[in-house]
């Protein structure tokens, strides 16, 4: 949509730069219009789907990314959006308030969630809260989250460990340092095709398409 | 229904909270549209319409709406009734006259354009 931003000089430094990715136009344009009228939040862009969002996000500075996860493919696209906006905090929109859903989204890298039964005031509090590093949720969800953390600490779940073998991890680190496949082959005394296979596997496991994204993705683990 | 002054009187009925607030904000921001009420549950639509005298009803999707709109339009032939519905990844706008007619994708812009038709 066409967003009329005030000139940069008039935008306060403290505004929360927010991007909206939502399939349903009424929510996308409506939320953008309402947030744009607030003092604390500036809408820097909107997109209907994850692919369009990722394209825009690479060129934008974004604090908070609001994602409509009602669409199934939006969820699988979270790693891609993360890579495109590594500094942004992610808020899921449209999630029903179910502990399991919230937990699975937290593991997918979501920092917050808002349901469509919430009010616009709730959404604004959530954006401000998540921007400060807080999660606003019901006591029941908070309890579930605490128990889940307990289970992770007890080693009953793998949690957010890097999904790479030690060799892949070694190669990923060198890719992240900007080395070419040829450099890596020389450094590790491997053949070039072997390195290519490893790099391919690394990109696949990290769910990214470009080697330039490896460093950002690794930094999250 | 007879409009008071030149503004179009709008009544919102039975929508998910965030959608209702978005529509209320979009309508409320326009000088020629006036939000006269928000009611929950289409069973009170008849009473709500009598009380608020709208020119335009914007309602969330509800199977009872077809029947109710036939009744309402019988009593108030100049009233217009719109239905907003989310199907999968898209929102749609319909007019019940009383037959349900699609007006395309639902957006703040399309909603305002349709609200101003025939006014």
Image: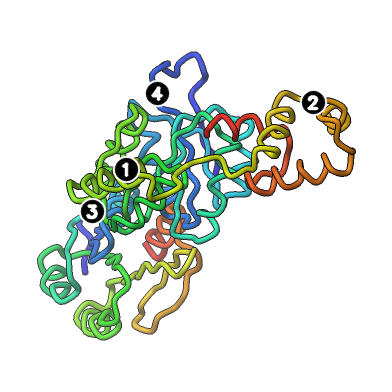
Gap between marks 3 and 2 measured at Cα? 62 Å
Q: Nearer the viewer, mark 3 or mark 2?
A: 2
Q: How many neighbours does mark 1 have within 10 angstroms: few (below 14), some (14-19), or many (20 or more)? A: some
Name which residue lies at 88% across and 31% down: A182
Q: Identify the image quadrant of residue A191.
A: top right
Expressed as whole percent of the image width and height from the top left, the position of residue A146 reads 25, 43
Q: In the image, is A59 to the left or to the right of A37?
A: right
Tell if the residue under mark 2 belongs to the same chain as the one under mark 1: yes
Task: Please say if the residues under marks 1 and 3 sit with CB atoms less than 8 Å apart.
Answer: no
Q: Identify the image quadrant of residue A128.
A: top left
State the residue in front, A114 or A189: A189
Q: Nearer the viewer, mark 4 or mark 2?
A: 2
Gap between marks 4 and 1 measured at Cα? 32 Å
Residue at image mark 4:
A15
Q: Is residue B38 above or below residue A8?
A: below
Task: Please say if the residues under marks 4 and 3 sit with CB atoms less than 8 Å apart.
Answer: no
State the residue in front, A198 or A61: A198
Q: Earlier in the sequence, mark 4 or mark 1?
A: 4
Q: Nearer the viewer, mark 1 or mark 3?
A: 1
Q: In the image, is A174 to the left or to the right of A93?
A: right
Indicate which disc residue B72 carries. none
Name which residue lies at 84% across and 33% down: A181
User: Which chain does the numbered disc 2 sit on?
Assistant: A
Expressed as whole percent of the image width and height from the top left, the position of residue A200 reads 76, 46
Task: Please say if the residues under marks 2 and 1 sit with CB atoms less than 8 Å apart.
Answer: no
Residue at image mark 1:
A149
Q: Is residue A177 above or below residue B39?
A: above
Q: Earlier in the sequence, mark 4 or mark 2?
A: 4
Residue at image mark 3:
B35
Tell if the residue under mark 4 belongs to the same chain as the one under mark 2: yes
């Amino acid at each position: 949509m066409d967003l009329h931003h005030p000139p940069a000089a008039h935008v306060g430094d403290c505004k929360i730069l927010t991007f909206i990715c939502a399939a349903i136009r009424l929510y996308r344009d409506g939320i953008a219009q309402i947030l744009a009228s607030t003092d604390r939040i500036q809408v820097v862009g909107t997109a209907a789907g994850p692919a369009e969002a990722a394209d825009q996000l690479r060129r934008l500075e974004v604090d908070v990314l609001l994602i409509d996860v009602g669409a199934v493919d939006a969820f699988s696209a979270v790693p891609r959006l993360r890579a495109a906006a590594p500094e942004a905090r992610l808020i899921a929109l449209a999630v029903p308030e179910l502990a399991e859903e919230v937990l699975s989204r937290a593991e997918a890298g979501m920092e917050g969630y808002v349901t469509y039964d919430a009010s616009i005031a709730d959404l604004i509090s959530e954006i401000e809260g998540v921007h400060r590093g807080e999660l606003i949720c019901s006591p029941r969800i908070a309890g579930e989250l605490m128990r889940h953390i307990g289970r992770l600490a007890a080693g009953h779940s793998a949690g957010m460990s890097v999904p790479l073998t030690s060799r892949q991890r070694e190669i990923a680190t060198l890719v992240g340092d900007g080395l070419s496949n040829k450099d890596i082959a020389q450094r590790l005394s491997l053949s070039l095709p072997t390195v290519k296979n490893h790099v391919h596997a690394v990109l696949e496991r990290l769910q990214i398409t470009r080697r330039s994204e490896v460093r950002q993705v690794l930094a999250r683990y | 229904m007879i409009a008071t002054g030149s503004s179009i009187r709008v009544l919102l009925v039975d929508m998910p909270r965030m959608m209702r607030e978005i529509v209320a904000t979009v309508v409320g921001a326009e000088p020629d549209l006036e939000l006269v009420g928000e009611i929950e549950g289409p069973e009170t639509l008849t009473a709500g319409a009598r009380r608020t005298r709208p020119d335009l009803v914007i309602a969330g999707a509800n199977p009872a709406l077809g029947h109710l709109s036939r009744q309402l339009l019988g009593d108030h032939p100049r009233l217009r009734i719109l239905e907003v519905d989310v199907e999968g990844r898209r929102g749609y706008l319909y007019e019940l006259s009383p037959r349900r007619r699609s007006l395309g994708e639902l957006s703040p812009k399309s909603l305002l354009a349709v609200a101003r038709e025939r006014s």
